[in-house]
Amino acid sequence: MISRGSIPILRIGSTLLATIQVELRDTVADVFQEDILTAIGKSGVASLLIDISGLEMVDSYVARVLVNTGQMAKLMGADTVLVGMRPEVAATLVRMGFRMTGVHTALNVDEGLALIAQLFQRRGRG
């Protein structure tokens, strides 16, 4: 397990898995982002799966941190899949005009891991 903040980051093969079970206030979100980037740098993983099913709400700052983290991870060589988004959260983000550019999404962890496997296959062939 890798983290200094309150959100554990687990390595599963070539994937980091972070399951957010606490409300992401601005400072917690910032520490989470730093922890993720440090973990990617140290482990050299190919993918990052962030489970937000424990979040009741996602404001624009937290959404931006999640997207920016995914974009930063991509620059470091890791694809990001965000899973567990509640319908209310998705609706709110769309109403705000927020785009999840650079971050893949899936319904749950199982589908997220399947998507990561597909991305890994594409990367190996391309």
Image (cartoon, rainbow, N blue to C red):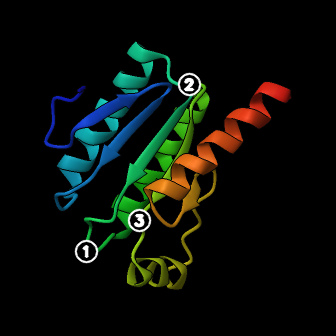
Neighbor class of circle 3 (other Cα within 10 Å; few <14, some 14-19, many 20+) is many
Up-down relation of residue 74 to residue 103 (above or below): above
Horizontal arrangement in the rendering, residue 89 relative to residue 8 (left or right): right
Q: Where's the N terminus, which quadrant? A: top left
Image location of residue 36, percent across then percent down: 36, 33
CA–CA distance in space, label 1 to label 2 = 29 Å
Tell me which numbered mark, 1 or 3, is placed earlier along the sequence: 1
| Residue at which label 1 appears | 56
Q: x, y (%) of residue 78?
A: 57, 31
User: Which of the two discs, 1 and 2, labels the residue nearer the N terminus?
Assistant: 1
Work out whether 78 lies above or below 38: below
Q: What secondary structure is found at the residue carrying circle 3?
A: loop
Secondary structure beneath dot 1 equals loop
Q: Amino acid at mark 1?
A: Glu
Q: Which residue is mark 2?
A: 76
Q: Residue furthest right?
A: 126
Kindly identify which numbered label has been placed on residue 84: 3
Q: Which part of the image, by quadrant, shows the C terminus?
A: top right
Q: Between tags 1 and 3, which lies in front?
A: 3
Q: CA distance from mark 2 to mark 3?
A: 24 Å
Residue 42 disc label: none
